[in-house]
Image: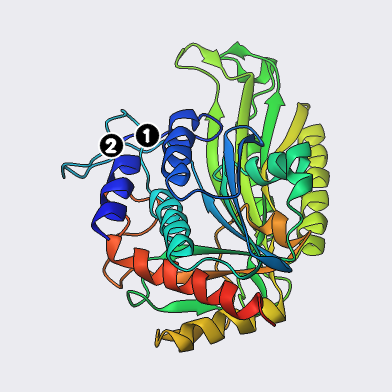
Amino acid sequence: MSELSTFRKKLHSEPELSGKEKHTAEKITSELKKTHPSKIITNLGGTGVAAIFNGKSDGKTIMFRAELDALPIQETNTFEHASKTKGVSHKCGHDGHATILIGLAKKIVENPIKKGKVILLFQPAEENGAGAKAVLEDPKFSEIKPDFIFALHNVPGFKKGEIVCKTGTFTPSVSSIAIELQGKTAHAAEPENGFNPDGTISELISSIKNLAIPDEKSDDFTVITTVYANLGSKNYGISAGKGEVHFTVRCWTPDKLEAVKKEIVRLVGEIAKKHHLKPSTEWIYEFSANKNDETAFSTIKKAALQNDFDFLEKATPFKWGEDFGLFTQHFKGAMFGLGAGEKTPALHNPDYDFPDELIPYGVKMFHAIFTNIGHD
């Protein structure tokens, strides 16, 4: 635990943004080499790393995934291992998730695999939704072909060490839209001589957010959030001639998300035309829904009970997006939550730090999952 905690704090103090995790990947690779896996694949989907541990006989291939990237958030913590990179920090716990996989590698050394194989995937660019797609499209991934794939995410607000899971949708389908509106500037004293996007932005916010369905128990659940808006410039004699507004959209199912996306695009075109503006739209930062397989869920629950960990079957999905969802669209698998403590700062908060006490919980869960499913 002492070695793993030190390693986790090293990752925490030197964070890197999505797609730029070169040094993080190098640290991971260096640590993996100490465990002598059968093979290490580097530069997977960019900066990704995969370690393959072969058993003595053929069997199922089980993959466990962690993430490499940090967030563009300025850390407010002042402890010794605080981020050394201005404006960048590990505020989602990816440093802890990656360390758990390193711990699993060490446990495999102590308890060599007898049957099948284990793959430890350290995925880049989770936060912007680009990493899973890049990994899957990399020709080097074709030699992996897992039978099952698993991941965890620490979840503040739940008892420390509690295992939180459910079948079906675990996290939603998510997409963000950037809407740009081109009008015409005019003198601020004569706005009628131009086309100012202010009224259009106001109407778009109202109309698009009216599409939300807040009932989490409904299959049509939809949450729409305005995340950014900009209008004109700080020139007080000019009536604005351009503007933009961005939203994130989250739905439990891919079909519902597609329906909402089509309606948003229709509204943008209709409202912009009414106000004599030229609109352009782009869908960005897309995350597939996590689809938890029933067999994978049962294996997670069994692993929790074997370890005498508290287990909570969540009634509704979490509302945050997770790039692991794309893997579950291609392979059987599941993600579970690992309680980070009821009073731990929330994810993406500037004072958050991954609790090192969670590392052995994650290692024991992953090891029990492989032991169970690998010998079924």
Residue 83's tag is 2
Residue ID at (62%, 75%): 215
**Residue 116 versus residue 6 in the image, above or below:** below
Which of the 4 image quarters holds residue 316?
Answer: bottom right
Viewer can see residue 138: no
Residue ID at (49%, 11%): 237
Query: In front here: 372 or 153?
Result: 372
Viewer can see residue 251: yes
- Disc 2 residue crowd, few under 14, some 14–19, many 20+, Cα 10 Å: many
Q: Which residue is label 1 attached to?
A: 88
Left or right, residue 174 beside residue 345: right
- Disc 1 residue crowd, few under 14, some 14–19, many 20+, Cα 10 Å: many
Residue type at tag 2: Ser
Tell me the SS state at disc 2.
Answer: loop
Query: In front here: 1 or 69?
Result: 1
Query: In front here: 205 or 373?
Result: 373
Which of the 4 image quarters holds residue 97?
Answer: bottom left
Residue ID at (32%, 43%): 12
Query: In front here: 42 or 48?
Result: 42
Query: Which quarter of the rendering shows the C terminus?
Result: bottom right
Residue type at tag 1: Val
Left or right, residue 272 beside residue 234: right
Q: CA distance from mark 2 to mark 1?
A: 7 Å
Tell me whether the residue at label 2 lies in contact with that at label 1, contact meaning CB atoms closer than 8 angstroms: yes
Tell me the SS state at disc 1.
Answer: loop
Residue 227 position in % (x across, y down): 53, 43
- Quick one: which residue is furthest to the left in this view? 79
